[in-house]
Amino acid sequence: MVNVEMVKAAAAYVEKRIEKKPEIGMILGSGLGALADEIKDPVVIPYEDIPYFPVSMVEGHANQLIVGELSGKQVLMMKGRFHLYEGYEPSLLAFPVRVMKQLNIEHLVVTNAAGGVNEKFLPGELMIIEDHLNMTACNPLMGANEEAFGPRFPDMTYAYNRDMREKAKKAAQKQGLILQQGVYAWFTGPSFETPAEIKMSRVLGADAVGMSTVPEVLAAVHAGVKVLGISCITNMAAGMLDQPLTHEEVMITARQSEGKFKQLIRDLIEEGF
Ligand code: HPA
């Protein structure tokens, strides 16, 4: 179980390594890590150097915290994240966000690669997350509640901050970028969903599916951190096209979308939250 001392130790280590305080946190999803290359004068901190910080084994995840300036603001990026399917104890999925909060970060941008469930979506498009469905029966806030992290029963009505969403839409409009909006459904993975699960998700109101993001959002909302979630639709979800899904396809499409993704984030950060 994660406790306050562990989070404080990790945050103190990061603080020691950096000169300026980060204002914005970012979690970069599969194939979307290149944004970290845009950071000026980056301080690169391998996860394994940070006390109690987990390390991810997923291909395409670099396991680095990268801190520095992007579009005139100090940002802290996680290049590589942790998934339930890797076998972590759920409260560990909340750990990095709690470290961000301990560093006084108030805004978090969470990104992911996701399968499109909405039939109007196309691979390569970006989607602003309006809300989520938790299909895992798991929550990183389960277990004894530490009041220092947040309340026992956090409200999820406004989990995905409205102002941040509006700003993202405006930034996309300025660029002439198609920006979809919708509900993200979190499945455990690591197997992709079945066609029947995708049909069920659509009936329940999902527009996209993936294996990440929700635990970090739950931890952020718990901590009072404002969240913007962006999915890169890397593929149509299982059964929508008569072809199998592969992680390779996910990575290739995510990388192809990186240019517009980077531009959107840069504009957003420049505008300020
Ligand atoms: N399902 C789950 N996770 C994903 C998908 C998908 O279709 N695409 C990218 N991540």
Image: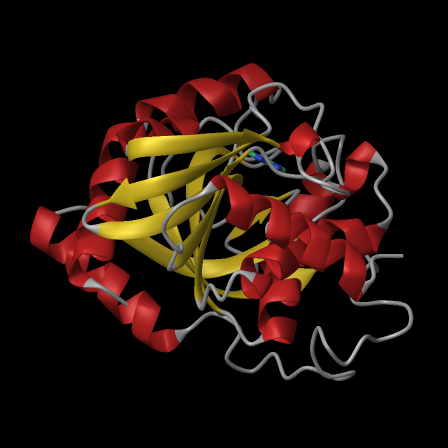
> Which of the 4 image quadrants contains residue 185?
bottom right
Q: Nearer the viewer, residue 149 or 188?
A: 149
In this rendering, the answer to whether 40 lies above or below 121 is above
Asked if residue 141 shows in the view, the reply is yes
Q: Ligand 1 falls in which quarter?
A: top right
Residue 199 in the figure: left or right of residue 253: right
> Which of the 4 image quadrants contains residue 204?
bottom right
Q: Quadrant of the N terminus?
A: bottom right
Instruction: Residue 89 in the image: state x and y as whole percent.
Output: 87, 48
Residue drawn at the location 81% of the way across and 75% of the way down: 146
Residue 14 in the figure: left or right of residue 178: right
In this rendering, the answer to whether 99 lies above or below 16 is below
Residue drawn at the location 10% of the way across and 47% of the way down: 175
In this rendering, the answer to whether 155 lies above or below 242 is below
Residue 160 in the figure: left or right of residue 93: left
Residue drawn at the location 13% of the way across and 56% of the way down: 173
Residue drawn at the location 41% of the way across and 41% of the way down: 67
Asked if residue 135 shows in the view, the reply is no
Instruction: Residue 6 in the image: state x and y as whole percent.
Output: 78, 54
In this rendering, the answer to whether 132 lies above or below 43 is below
